[in-house]
Amino acid sequence: MKRIVHFSCGAASAVAALISMLSGDEIELVYTDPGLEHKDNQRFLRDFENMTGHKVTILKSKKYKDPFEIFEERRFLAGVHGAPCTTELKKITARNYLGSRLLEEVNVFGFDCSKREKKRSEKYKNNNPELMTCFPLIDEDINKNDCYYIIDSLGLDLPYMYKLGYKNANCTGCVKAENIGYWAAIREDFPDVFDRYAKLEREFGAIDPATGKPRGAAINKRYEGETRIRVFLDEIPIDKKPQRNFSFSCGYSCGAQDMEIVAVKELTKEPSLTSYLMANKIKKFLNN
């Protein structure tokens, strides 16, 4: 049966694609470009194409250039059910291209075998019972660290976002990342993006009848007891320590925020037997 591999320029989806190639089934790799990812993601995509001989179909929204255009039109950044940029730039874009194939072919995603990712995969299946899904990393018992090892062992240079210390190769500033340390890192690494988000936060939100101005729409928050206090980007202390190892999801399967903190030091761990064997299996396949 034909397979659609939802490729994201990240390590996990790349390994999921490689495992799918081993099946012998006809596959298509589909990447939805949101317009705000690091330019090195495109370099990784091209390197992956050259190594595997598989062309990646690159999709772009016909309506929006990047997330900022959506935020400015909607006057909204993100909520508990995700962000409008994911829906418009990824989900709708993919659906418009794939059409009925979404229901007729197997959809391959890069959820890994960690407890958290297994829960996400189950949630995705429950929310999309009409789709045929496949999670190669879970089936093969491969975690995120295994993916790093496999990619490295194949001689592929990981996207630059990983080298900076980020856990994902997502946009250079994601509104679903509700973490002050993460935004301190974005301020340091991508100041123009940070400043634009900080400006939008102050421009959005309900109008305060007392002032006639927007109340603002802060991405971050903190709590004092049970009291929720909004924290705007321009309020983050200048000495706040950047935190780049903050993991969160973004892609066709994105929904409500589902995040955890994972040490990027995993990149240096010894490979598991599973990843070692899988890397050798993939090398043999690619060399044939």
Image (tube, rainbow, N blue to C red):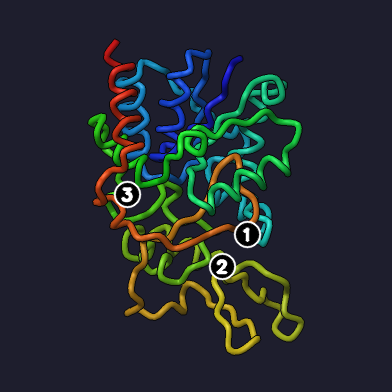
Q: Is residue 265 above or below residue 178?
A: above
- Label 2 sits on what residue type? Ile
Q: Quadrant of the N terminus?
A: top right
Cα separation, mark 1 vs mark 3, equals 24 Å
Q: Nearer the viewer, mark 1 or mark 3?
A: 3
Task: Name which of mark 3 and mark 2 comes first in the sequence.
Answer: 3
Residue at the far front in the pictured view: 273
Q: Is residue 276 above or below residue 266?
A: above
Q: Is residue 211 above or below residue 91?
A: below
Is label 1 in a helix, a strand or a loop?
loop
Cα separation, mark 3 vs mark 2, equals 23 Å
Q: Which residue is mark 1?
A: 78
Say few, some or many: other residues with alpha carbon within 10 Å of mark 2 (under 14 / 14 to 19 / 20 or more). many
Q: Residue at x 50, y 62 (%)?
A: 197
Q: Residue at x 67, y 28 (%)?
A: 132
Is label 2 in a helix, a strand or a loop?
loop
Q: Quadrant of the C terminus?
A: top left
Instruction: In the rendered structure, find residue 219 and report the number of the disc placed on it.
Output: 2
Q: How many marks?
A: 3
